[in-house]
Image (spheres, grey):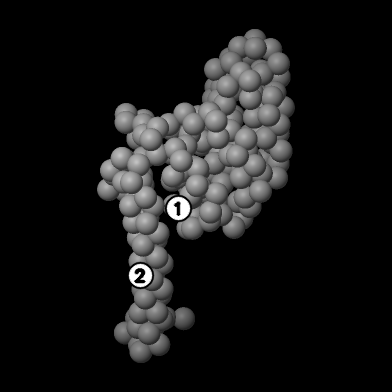
Amino acid sequence: MKVDYNSPEWIAMREEREKKFQERWAEYDRLEKLILQELETVGVSVNSLWNLSSKKDPHKKSLPVLIKHVQVFYHDKINEILARSLGSIKATECWDMLVELFCKTDRQVHRNFKDGLACALFDLVSKKTMDEYITLLKDKRHGQSRILMVGKLRRSRQPEIIALIDELAEDEDLKIEIGSWKRKRQ
């Protein structure tokens, strides 16, 4: 069936879709501006939330504002940026909160936020938190967000981590990523 892109029905549908997109974008912009204004009150001046996660210029002063806002759901992309920013500024004191958010965030509903949390955990994992990190990696309920976390194990030469990688390589969500590593067998 041929579509008539000049038909009144098609034009109305396209205009409605564009209107909804513009409304979502306006809401995103409004929410971002509110958080940016609050960041300015603590001495952090950036023109976009994405600038907070810059590894070149971490803003530790932004920590209280980020902690406050990452726990409130605004918009999937905004919450993703807030989570990633906590990882990039090495906010290790937020580990437990980020794990809790990661566990209760449904990737089917908030994919970007879940992935942002996965990136933050990747940035913050330490020897002290590695066991919990591995538990999260093994938990299939976290789906494909674990792809963003599994790379932390890649360069390890520890026999137990190599065995874990072999185990995770059988996981449907992780096998392509792990298979791409071209890991030398010990």
Hey, what amino acid is under mark 2?
A: Gln
Q: In this view, does 32 lie to the left or right of 124?
A: left
Identity of the residue drawn at 63% across and 52% down: 106
| Label 2 crowd (10 A; few <14 / some 14-19 / many >=20) | few
Residue depicted at 50% across the width and 47% down the height: 68
Query: What amino acid is at disc 1?
Result: Lys
**Crowding near the residue tagged with mark 1, few <14, some 14–19, many ≥20 C-alpha atoms within 10 Å:** some
In the orientation shown, which residue stands out farthest toward the bottom?
8
Could you say which is closer to the camera, residue 165 or residue 2?
A: 165
- 1 and 2 marks in contact (CB < 8 Å): no
Do we see residue 74 in this rendering? yes
Residue 155 percent coordinates (x, y)? 55, 17
Q: Quadrant of the C terminus?
A: top right
Residue under label 2: 22
Residue 2 or 72: which is nearer the viewer?
A: 72
Q: Position of residue 176 (x, y in %)?
A: 59, 35
Question: Label 1 to label 2, Cα distance in Å?
Answer: 16 Å
Seen in the picture, residue 26 relative to 146 is either above or below; the reply is: below
Between 144 and 68, the residue placed more toward the observer is 68
- State the image coordinates of residue 129 (x, y, percent, origin top left): 63, 25
Q: Mark 1 points at which residue?
A: 77
Q: Helix, strand, or loop for circle 1?
A: helix
> Is 122 displayed left or right of 17 in the figure?
right
Q: Which residue lies furthest to the front in this view?
A: 41
Specify the quadrant of the image occupied by residue 8.
Answer: bottom left
The residue drawn where x is 40% and y is 79% is 16
First along the sequence among labels 1 and 2: 2
| Residue at x 49%, y 58% (from the top left corner) | 74
**Horizontal and vertical percent position of residue 53:** 38, 38
